[in-house]
Amino acid sequence: MVVRRPVSNPIGDFLTFRWMITPLLIQAFFWLGTLGCLLCGGRVMLSSFESRPDPLNGYERAGTGVEKARKSSASNFAVMEFAGGLMIVVMGPLVLRIACELDIILFKIHDELKSTNDRARYRSND
């Protein structure tokens, strides 16, 4: 006796939770997170070129007293801030990708177990 597989209905599968939407949501989360990492890292990198306040707050210690010094509007490049922004741009999407892949692996394992169960259930008993 051969047992036939039931015909799949996409709407029925969705409503009965046989079709998972979470893998699609994980992919959307990855792309939104990657965009966020690029924007955030780019913003940090650009802010490393902005002028910084004088560490002495515009005052210079000279001689016996504290005298007012001319404020310099020279731009100070912040190397560590630029490196931090670069790390966000490079490592952020990589770490996010690894986390998303680990989540998707769980769904692939589930799909494989389900198909193995279906093959065992609906194979012909000759």
Image (cartoon, rainbow, N blue to C red):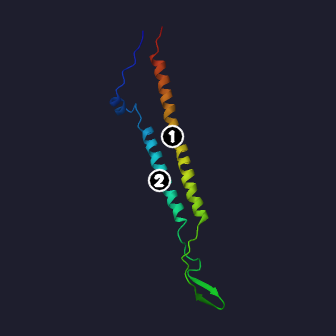
77 vs 32: above or below: below
Residue topped by disc 1 = 103
Q: Nearer the viewer, residue 73 or 60?
A: 73
Helix, strand or loop for disc 1: helix
Most distant residue in the front direction? 74
Residue topped by disc 2 = 36
The picture places residue 105, in percent across and down from the top left corner, at: 52, 36
7 vs 110: above or below: above
Name the kind of residue labelled 1 in the image: Asp
Give the CA separation, mark 1 to mark 2: 20 Å
* Residue at image coords 50%, 38%: 104
Name the kind of residue labelled 2 in the image: Gly
Q: In the image, is 70 to the left or to the right of 29?
A: right
Q: Nearer the viewer, residue 95 or 63?
A: 63
The picture places residue 95, in percent across and down from the top left corner, at: 56, 47
* Residue at image coords 35%, 29%: 10
